Image (tube, rainbow, N blue to C red):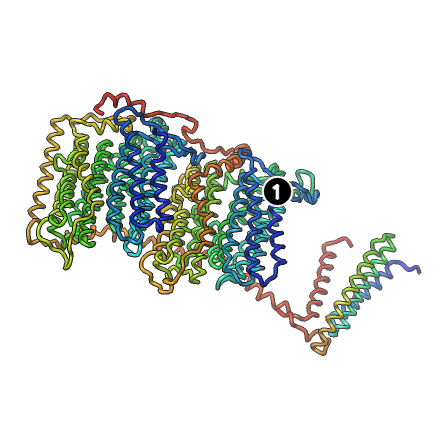
């Protein structure tokens, strides 16, 4: 059964279903869109359930060649790296659609765009063919542009254009690199071109070519992540986008960048990764500190969370280029976790924005008195985002830091200061918005979250706690693929994953026994 | 004096030049349009002549293609000219500068 | 039996969940009783295995629960040894009493159930911290107690000062946590695991002195945050904005001692780093003295106790620094009892005085609040170090251990003695101003004794504050022996000669009595001494350390952030992207003149272009 194709086609079919609904019946469009967006989640659940733990290779592979000469085909598969990106995408889309209850304007178009976007994002994570990957990578751009441009707030024209131009600029490099790599790969296997990811693994390239191609991929993904100093599109896009747009942007679209870095830069160009990875990791660390520092003084709550994303994505990039099993697993875990926590924060901000139509922190104050449930959930998400142990954010950041220290000690120590800064910007914002007396009389009449809104947030809350307390099932599925990646790097380059002391020592000292007899002879 | 290919090519060149001159000099859209047709047909003539000379069929195929495209183009072009004439009561192209940057 | 120790954590955690999520429906006072019963049962459950360790019928062991983060080898596991058993008993015991107390204290609060939810959450977090069998899990507890502390300090969030104090506490603690986190990185890089068993047994082989020094100093940075030492102590006085039971439980008895506990747990590492030991002892001594000086000048009854706590924590840290881990932990235990007692007593006073905290407006409460008066007397004598109350024994042990090191350490010993003198002085000041003399109450205040739910915990703690000290006299070191398995891997100093110990103890006692007498005669009179200007004013303001940090760190930091946000981002980075956009626009403006809209000019262009192309081909000798 071509499960992955079904997964990819389902949202499109859903979009067609929504397309034939009567435009003037929003009460039909909303629930039906929600239902059709849950179907991919069910398929993703099926994939998760049937995923073979401990298998590092690609699973559920489908390979249909469209054109032998240029080596282009429908090649899709999942492995430990992409599995959770797919599940996260399939999870966040129904949530984002459910949270679009307040959209009344052109609802049908809105839902169709959302569903098309879902196919695009899923395709990015599933493609094993670089041309196919690029096609999906670009498909994502259009619905997202329209979501911001048509349903955004005041400054949406500027923000959406900035989003498109930044991403498209990166895509140009990406496309050129993909074509070049495809032609070089084809040359070696005797066809005009080949875009099969698996053949590209064995392509022999000169060092200069590698550096050029690596840079092409890296620029495109660095803009998408976004890595400092390519991040300035993100705060604008986030701030102007509708709630669902922000959730998806932070939740899954940014992950396309880090996923790309991991899947293509690290895997296809191990030598360059080893030699120049430090500089990308450094940019990540600059992003951690810089993003957090800028977030502290933001007067706009949504912008604040956007800059916090810059900071958190910096951790992921650091982890990717640290090239240790810990750091890589932590990075992938952090991608999931960031999707959940930042998604929750944007949802919450959207919920209060629907009531007050302001994002300015200064317009709020004492909100916890009128909206206690909202305040509680916001604080929960803020702490999850700030990496409080026991919640998912900590597991990712902690593992990244521990792993990165082995390769880049200085960078890891600097980035650990992110935990201080995160506490400052989130708690200070919380203080100004939620505590103290109510300063703005308009706030007094606000209603707390209703059952629907709580139900939207509940899956995220449960997952944040669940993954924080028991991350092992996720880690178990990530680990083999990550280790395979590292083995490949070690085989191709001189790089050795840093050894650390005593890991194989199974010294298990029952250290009560040593001295305990003495105790009995004592005064006890 | 046999009819060598040179004659055909010279005729074609002459027709093409007349066409070019017409497009560049005349202001009436209809006349410019006819000049373009003249250029197309001069190229057709070249195709057919060379095709006959080399004994290849491709040239004639190309000529047929050009004729079909030209027919389609004429239809659309004339429609545009008529539409413009209705608005401006003139077919003078110098009066049309809506697409100025 | 010990297999079920996870229930200790699960019980308060359940209570936290129920009270936070369903608290509104449960309501007062049921939510409070639920919290109390759960924590009380945790205590009861812990009693048996603790007795097992005490009598020798049980052995220390590690109880594996589940694998948490496999890739860094962090398992969720419980280490049950005398040290963790002791802390468990204190946390659940004092915790249960304070829950009981809070039922009375929080009566009528609109978020009554929520309060108990947070308290339960704190107990669970603290138990995770003390029962952890590796640094990673300890760090979970470490951060979660910070969370509970944040929630409880800013419990009355409608007061801006309370909200700010909670935030400050969390952020300052996070600075310390940065140190802890970096220490964890080095530990993992050195050992490849966080497990205490592996680390402590292999540390002498694996670690160089440099690495050990780095790890321990970073861990100590974490401890200065949590245990309120110089330079990070500034959050604790502000934390008094929280309800008084919180101050008693978290900011006196348990959470703030976590730093001391953590260092005692890591004793093996600290033994490997002599430089760290000196640093820690000096900072501990300095903190003890500075905080004692500030405490002398405070007028708010809770602020006096807050600075007193900082000062006492300084003693414990000093104890750890000189290598007297058991003594440090012993002082931690006695302090937990008498300081919780003092705070709860102060809470009872504040409760009875209708939320008045200024000691200048108290006086003569002896008759109005007899139970509080009597129990506070015990607490006062205990902390002042009067024989035979518990504080006497524990403080004396730390001072003796410092003295024993000899040489320059004697300076530190003198500092400790000086701090002890000041302690006796300010505690007597507090005691006299509050309970003795004439009433100086504000109009219409009618002090009354608190309900039994509040006085019963006072009585129990008072008994503990009296008797706990005798467990560890220089003559009979039962406490030290009990803890021995936890410190099995480090070398022990020879116990002090009894005569010398007795002389030192006597000297400390004389100093304490001197302090009490000095203070007694200064304050126990009708005309209170004028304490304004100069030293008093600066002391009341905490010697402006907060302002200093504000000027040196916070304000410049904010300036940098604003520079990033207002200049670098919009003008610098976006300047470049806008510049590129502007360049494209200018080029377009220039080129658009070519687009005349004239068909014939386009045709001319095509013709010229064609000619140029043909000429070029001919000139280059193309295929014609």
The quadrant where residue C471 appears: top left
Q: Is residue C338 left or right of residue A292?
A: left
Q: Which residue lies furthest to the bottom in this view?
A: B89
At mark 1, the secondary structure is helix
Q: Which residue is drawn at 70% across and 77% down?
A: B88
Asked if one can make out residue C379 in the rendered structure from this viewpoint, the answer is: yes
Which quadrant of the rendered structure holds the N terminus of chain B?
bottom right
Comparing B56 with C367, the one in front is C367
Comparing A281 with A76, the one in front is A76
Count the labels in the image: 1
Image position, residue C61 (x, y; %): 34, 27
Image position, residue A471 (x, y; %): 45, 39
Give the residue at mark 1.
Answer: A3
Task: Please state the chain letter of the residue tagged with numbered disc 1 in the rendered image.
Answer: A
Image position, residue C555 (x, y; %): 31, 55
Q: Is residue B69 left or right of residue C424?
A: right
Image position, residue A101 (x, y; %): 50, 58
Asked if one can make out residue C270 in the rendered structure from this viewpoint, the answer is: no
């Amino acid at each position: 059964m071509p499960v992955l194709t079904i997964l990819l086609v389902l949202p499109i079919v859903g979009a067609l279903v929504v397309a034939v609904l009567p435009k003037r019946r929003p009460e039909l469009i909303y629930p039906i869109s929600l239902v059709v967006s849950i179907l991919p989640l069910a398929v993703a659940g099926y994939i998760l359930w049937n995923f073979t733990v401990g298998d590092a290779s690609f699973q559920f592979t489908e390979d249909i060649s469209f054109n032998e000469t240029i080596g282009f085909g429908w090649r899709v598969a999942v492995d430990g790296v992409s599995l959770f990106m797919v599940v996260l995408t399939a999870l966040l889309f129904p949530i984002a659609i459910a949270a679009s209850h307040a959209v009344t304007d052109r609802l049908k178009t809105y839902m169709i765009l959302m569903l098309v976007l879902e196919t695009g994002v899923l395709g990015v994570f599933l493609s094993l063919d670089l041309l196919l990957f690029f096609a999906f990578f670009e498909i994502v751009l259009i619905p997202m542009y329209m979501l911001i441009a048509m349903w955004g707030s005041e400054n949406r024209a500027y923000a959406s254009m900035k989003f498109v131009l930044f991403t498209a600029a990166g895509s140009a490099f990406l496309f050129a690199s993909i074509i070049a790599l495809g032609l070089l790969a084809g040359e070696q296997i005797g066809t005009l071109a080949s875009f099969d990811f698996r053949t590209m693994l064995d392509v022999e390239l000169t060092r200069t070519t590698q550096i050029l191609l690596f840079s092409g991929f890296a620029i495109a993904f660095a803009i998408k992540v976004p890595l400092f100093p390519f991040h300035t599109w993100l705060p604008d896009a986030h701030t102007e986008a509708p709630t669902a747009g922000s959730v998806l942007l932070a939740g899954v679209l940014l992950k396309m960048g880090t996923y790309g870095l991991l899947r293509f830069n690290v895997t296809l160009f191990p030598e360059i990764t080893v030699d120049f990875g430090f500089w990308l990791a450094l940019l990540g660390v600059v992003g951690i500190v810089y993003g957090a520092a800028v977030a502290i003084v933001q007067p706009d709550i949504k912008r604040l969370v956007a800059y916090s994303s810059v900071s958190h994505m910096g951790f992921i990039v650091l982890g990717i280029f640290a090239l240790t099993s810990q750091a890589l697993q932590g990075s992938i875990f952090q991608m999931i976790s960031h999707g959940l926590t930042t998604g929750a924060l944007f949802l919450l901000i959207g919920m209060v924005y629907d009531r007050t139509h302001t994002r300015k922190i200064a317009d709020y104050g004492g909100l916890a008195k009128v909206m206690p449930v909202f305040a509680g959930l916001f604080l929960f998400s803020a702490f999850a985002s700030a990496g409080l142990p026991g919640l998912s954010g900590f597991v990712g950041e902690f593992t990244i830091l521990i792993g990165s220290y082995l390769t880049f000690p200085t960078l890891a120590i600097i980035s650990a200061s992110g935990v201080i800064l995160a506490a400052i910007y989130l708690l200070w914002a919380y203080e100004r918005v939620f505590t103290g007396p109510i300063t703005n009389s308009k706030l007094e009449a606000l209603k707390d979250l209703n059952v629907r809104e709580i139900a939207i947030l509940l899956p995220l809350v449960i997952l944040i706690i669940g993954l924080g307390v028991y991350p092992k099932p996720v880690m178990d599925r990530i680990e083999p693929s990550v280790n395979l990646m590292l083995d490949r790097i070690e085989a191709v380059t001189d790089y050795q994953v840093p050894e650390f002391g005593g890991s194989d020592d199974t010294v298990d000292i029952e250290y009560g026994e040593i001295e305990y007899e003495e105790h009995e002879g004592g005064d006890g | 004096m046999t009819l060598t290919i040179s004659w055909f090519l010279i005729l074609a060149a002459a027709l093409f030049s007349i066409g070019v001159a017409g497009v560049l000099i005349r202001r009436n859209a209809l006349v410019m349009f006819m000049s373009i047709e003249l250029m197309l047909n001069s190229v057709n003539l070249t195709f057919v002549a060379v095709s006959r000379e080399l004994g290849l069929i491709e040239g004639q195929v190309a000529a047929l293609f050009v004729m079909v495209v030209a027919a389609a183009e004429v239809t659309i072009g004339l429609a545009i000219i008529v539409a413009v004439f209705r608005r401006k009561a003139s077919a003078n192209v110098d009066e049309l500068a809506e697409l100025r940057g | 039996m010990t297999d079920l120790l996870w229930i200790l954590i699960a019980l308060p955690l359940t209570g936290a969940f129920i009270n936070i999520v369903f608290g509104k429906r449960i309501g007062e006072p049921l939510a409070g009783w639920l919290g109390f019963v759960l924590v009380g049962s945790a205590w009861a459950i812990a009693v048996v295995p603790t007795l097992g360790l005490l009598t020798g019928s049980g052995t220390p062991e590690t109880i594996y629960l589940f694998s948490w983060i496999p890739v860094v080898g962090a398992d969720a596991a419980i280490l049950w040894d005398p040290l963790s058993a002791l802390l468990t008993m204190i946390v659940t015991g004092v915790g249960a009493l304070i829950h009981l107390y809070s039922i009375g204290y929080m009566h009528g609060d609109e978020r009554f159930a929520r309060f108990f939810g947070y308290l339960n959450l704190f107990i669970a977090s603290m138990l995770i911290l003390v029962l952890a069998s590796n640094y990673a899990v300890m760090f979970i507890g470490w951060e979660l107690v910070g969370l509970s502390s944040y929630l409880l300090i800013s419990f009355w969030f409608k007061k801006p000062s309370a909200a700010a104090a909670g935030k400050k506490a969390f952020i300052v603690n996070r600075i310390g946590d940065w140190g802890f986190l970096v220490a964890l990185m080095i530990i993992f890089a050195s050992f490849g695991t966080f497990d205490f068993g592996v680390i402590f047994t292999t540390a002498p082989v694996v670690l160089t002195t440099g690495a050990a020094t780095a790890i321990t100093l970073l861990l100590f940075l974490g401890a200065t945050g949590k245990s309120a030492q110089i330079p990070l102590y500034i959050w604790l006085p502000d934390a008094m904005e929280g309800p008084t039971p919180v101050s008693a439980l978290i900011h006196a008895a348990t959470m703030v001692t976590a730093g001391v506990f953590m260092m005692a747990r890591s004793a093996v590492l600290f033994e490997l780093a002599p430089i760290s030991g000196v640093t820690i002892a000096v900072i501990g001594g300095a903190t003890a003295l500075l905080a004692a000086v500030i405490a002398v000048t405070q007028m708010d009854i809770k602020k006096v106790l807050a600075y007193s706590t900082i000062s006492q924590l300084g003693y414990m840290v000093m104890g750890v620094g000189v290598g007297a881990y058991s003594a440090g932990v012993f002082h931690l235990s006695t302090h937990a009892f008498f300081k919780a007692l003092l705070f709860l007593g102060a809470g009872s006073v504040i409760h009875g005085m209708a939320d008045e905290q200024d000691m200048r407006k108290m006086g003569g409460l002896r008759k109005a609040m007899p139970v509080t008066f009597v129990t506070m007397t015990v607490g006062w004598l205990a902390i002042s170090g009067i024989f035979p109350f518990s504080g006497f024994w524990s403080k004396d042990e730390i001072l003796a251990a410092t003295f024993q090191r000899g040489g320059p350490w004697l300076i530190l010993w003198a500092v400790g003695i000086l701090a002890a003198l000041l302690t006796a002085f300010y505690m007597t000041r507090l005691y006299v101003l509050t309970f003795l003399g004439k009433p100086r109450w504000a109009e219409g205040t009618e002090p009354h004794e608190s309900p039994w739910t509040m006085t019963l915990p006072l009585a129990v703690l008072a008994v503990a504050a009296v008797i706990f000290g005798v467990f560890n006299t220089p003559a009979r070191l039962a406490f030290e022996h009990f803890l021995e398995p936890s410190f099995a891997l480090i070398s022990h100093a020879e116990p002090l000669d009894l005569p010398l110990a007795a002389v030192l103890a006597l000297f400390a006692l004389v100093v304490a009595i001197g302090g009490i007498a000095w203070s007694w005669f200064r304050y126990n009179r009708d005309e209170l001494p004028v304490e304004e200007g100069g030293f008093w004013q600066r002391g009341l303001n905490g010697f402006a350390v907060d302002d200093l940090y504000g000027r040196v760190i916070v304000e410049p930091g904010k300036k940098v952030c604003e520079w990033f946000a207002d200049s670098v981002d919009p003008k610098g980075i976006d300047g470049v992207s806008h510049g590129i956009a502007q360049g494209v626009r200018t080029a377009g403006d220039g080129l658009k003149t070519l687009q005349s809209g004239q068909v014939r000019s386009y045709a001319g262009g095509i013709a010229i272009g064609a000619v140029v192309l043909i000429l070029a081909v001919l000139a280059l000798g193309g295929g014609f």
